[in-house]
Amino acid sequence: MVYYESISAQNTSLEARELYFNNTNLKDEAPHVLLQTCNRIEVYKGEGDIPDDVIRHLFRVTSGLESALPGERAIQGQVKEAYCQACENYKLPISMHKLFQAALSVGKRVRSETEISQGAVSHSLAALEIMKDEEVDFAHSLISIIGVNKLTEDTIKFLKNKGSQAIFLANRSVEKARMLAQATDCEVCDLRDKHKFIAFSDILITATSAPHLIIRPEDINPQKKLLIIDLAFPRDVDERIKSFPNVSLYNLQDIERHISKNITLRKHEVVKAEQIIEKEIHNLQSAFQKRKERILI
């Protein structure tokens, strides 16, 4: 029997997800698919029959219906990456292959046949909205970004569109930072000099994949006005910094709470997406049944 274990933004706090991340052995030797994003950690295990509720859950996840930002597109690629990684590491059972291949197909179908992703707000756009609310002067603010990935790349593009001129990029791999900086016309900083570039920054945005804190209280001048947006999971920035009188700190949970969703459009499109998912669950189970019958003949 195929089953899954899940901890996500839908059912736990950011703190609980970090605790699970830090105290769970995610390197199980048995064949499995590990889906790990900023909003969820899920492990799919087992072989043989797959209950409808397991199929339905993964189909909903891949379609963006279980995301903190309903309809977001990134989850489709994250599910694909998790599946491909599992294929490299393990000999997955046929039922697991069928499940994930069907889920990726359903995710594409939902987005092409509904408007669930129309106007969907990304974390990078939400960060931009927070900066607007904080009355940031984009043209004259010094902005430092830590981390090189799709999220920081999108953030830089949005900042450039708002007129930002002074953007500094740091990363554990200086070469990766240099490549993105050249493509987006930014300056590169050495992460080892974080206390230096943070000292002259008006805004600090972090989005690394580090399993530990990157920014601690001793890295920050409590007397300097600073806006920090921590988009990482687990968090990059020590929460104690939030107590500094001149620092405004937003973490991933704050970002998601801040987001204003187009509820009317989404509710209507969610119903359409759910109808597609139910049909595809039936199709997948029918395919499994036909395969069993062929084996028995």
Image (cartoon, grey):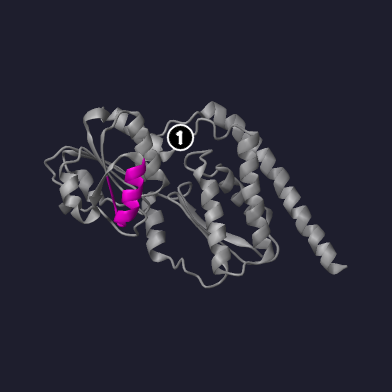
Residue shown at 60% from the left, 38% from the top: 111
Which residue is drawn at the image coordinates 43% and 30% (left, top)? 260
Percent across and percent down for residue 8 are 47, 51
* Residue 240 place in picture, x, y as percent: 22, 50
Q: How many marks?
A: 1
Left or right, residue 105 beside residue 255: right
| Res 175 quadrant in image | bottom left
Q: Residue furthest right?
A: 297
Instruction: Look at 68% across and 53% down and name the residue there.
Output: 52
- Magenta run includes residue 63: no
SS state under label 1: loop
Quarter of the image where the N terminus is located: bottom right
Report which quarter residue 275 is drawn in.
top right
| Helix, strand or loop: magenta stretch | helix
Tell whether 243 sits left or right of 91: left
Residue at 54 percent of width and 44 percent of height:
66
Is 170 a magenta residue?
yes
Position of residue 95 measured from the top left corner of the image (x, y, whole percent): 68, 62
Please state which amino acid type lies under the numbered disc 1. Val
Q: Is residue 137 visible?
A: no
Front position in the image: 160 or 95: 160
21 w.r.t. 135: above or below: below
Name, please, the residue furthest toward the bottom: 29
Range covered by the magenta-colored residues: 169-183
